[in-house]
Amino acid sequence: MERYDQARFSQADDAEYEPLLSEKSTEEVEVESSLPDDLTRDSLELPDLSEPELVRHYVRLSQQNYGVDTGPYPLGSCTMKYNPKFTEDLAARPEAAVHPDRSEESVQGTLGLLHGLQEQLKKIGGMDAVTLQPPAGAAGEFAGILLAKAYHESRGEGAQRDEIVIPDSAHGTNFASAALGGYDVVELPSADDGRVDLDALEAAVGENTAALMLTNPNTLGLFERDIEEIADVVHDAGGLLYYDGANLNALLGRARPGDMGFDIMHFNVHKTFATPHGGGGPGAGPVGVTDDLAEFLPNPQVRETDAGFEFFEPDSSIGKVHGFYGNWLVLVKAYAYIARLGDDGLGDAAAKAVLNANYLAEQVEYDVPFEPFHHEFVASAGDQDAADVAKRMLDYAVHPPTTKWPEIVSEALMTEPTEVESKRTLDQLAAAFNAVADESTETIESAPERTTARRIDQTEAARNPRLSWHALDN
Ligand SMILES: *Cc1c(COP(=O)(O)O)cnc(C)c1O
């Protein structure tokens, strides 16, 4: 509390927020120039501030922010884990700044890294081929849907197979990707135990099914134990099985979607393999496929020949889904992270992710209706509103979990501590949960009290964001 008040004190005047630079200084900079008069302006609309004023402005803003470098960030499903700085250092090296139009011969190291990452991801996912091009998980989903479509079309079943089956616990992007791909979405209700209901699946799947999209462990953190039967049901009907890789952290180095029968998968490298995300990116969503679908992958792919590495276009490629070869620097970080951890390290990360989630759930007083979960759990805020709980947790200086989703759990607090947090941090997190659990509705419904911005209109902020100074004018 005290530290916070000091920060507020240091803000100019009695402004509620840190003022904009243009609000701090209304004087404009006089420009003296030896250029001809008709080529110069009298003044520039730049604030006239000293270096310390400028530096303090940005440092204060950074201190008002919360991030994985500030504290734990247990956003279930989003996997906001601390990302080691050595990956940032590598991506920031001048050698990493390659112009995408350079000739293949002159960027053999770049192509070697891309090829290496393709190979690493193939091995981790149990897939036969991988594209690195999609720039996010959702973009990977959409590319995956286009691949499924190309596959069915090549077999003359494109028009007939116009449905995609998705469990009700799935991430919203699954529904959006399927719809954007021109498919009708068939929503699959979950069984009482929170998993895929096999009877419902058999009823939903048939000759119109293009694919089933599945997250495993699902968004309740539950492993789909019947995955082999699920795969058989889908494959027997002629459909494909799509793996949403957002929860790969639970399986990393221990189990592979390819071995479970999945035909297509995306990796959220920004969730699983370093690169902080949030705020819209940048990320990368590489897509892995089995041999049957490799010919449709986006262009270009990288392959190794006797003469070195080269780009090539797969035979029946769906084309490009992003400029050049994707978000290169994010891929550098993913490659470095995987190389540094090695096979054992990846398996260890998964084990710790699961251990940490289970330890935290033990300490938290809120009820956790679905078990046994893996790297994340979904607690119920019970009589409290999950959004109030989340806002109140900010007052205890930790980031709250994902709320109100999946809807199978009422007032859901979807929590994923990730493998990087220590027992000490998990205990702090649990203390914050439990302090809020004991508080009254009156206390929590007006939270947060101790943050720079109080309750904002979240819907308005998402639907009608005002991101510039000029927008504030009107
Ligand atoms: C994050 C997430 C996605 C979408 O990934 P983005 O990289 O954010 O586009 C898809 N499915 C699940 C389950 C997720 O958690």
Image (spheres, rainbow, N blue to C red):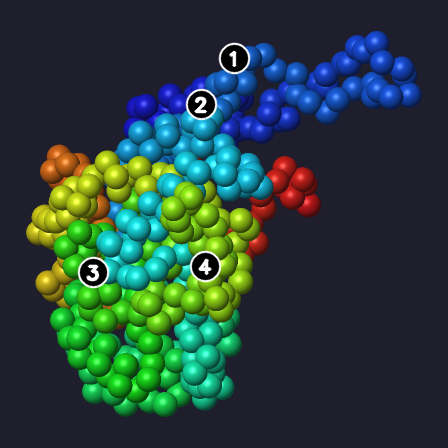
Of the two numbered discs 1 and 3 on the same chain, state the one appearing first in sequence.
Answer: 1
Q: Badge 3: few (under 14), some or many (20 or more) residues near its Cα, within 10 Å?
A: some
Which structural element holds mark 3?
A: loop
Quadrant of the snapshot with the C terminus:
top right
- Amino acid type shown at disc 3: Arg
Of the two numbered discs 4 and 3 on the same chain, state the one appearing first in sequence.
Answer: 4
Label annotation for residue 52: 1
| Distance of label 4 from label 1 (alpha carbons) | 42 Å
| Distance of label 2 from label 1 (alpha carbons) | 10 Å
Q: Comparing marks 4 and 1, which lies closer to the viewer?
A: 4
Which structural element holds mark 1?
A: helix
Label annotation for residue 139: 4
Whole-percent x, y for residue 119 in the image: 30, 51
Q: Is residue 272 left or right of residue 112?
A: left
Of the two numbered discs 4 and 2 on the same chain, state the one appearing first in sequence.
Answer: 2
Label annotation for residue 59: 2
Do callouts 4 and 3 mark residues in contact (Cβ within 8 Å)? no
- Amino acid type shown at disc 2: Val
Whole-percent x, y for residue 34 in the image: 84, 9
Q: Is residue 262 above or below residue 49?
A: below
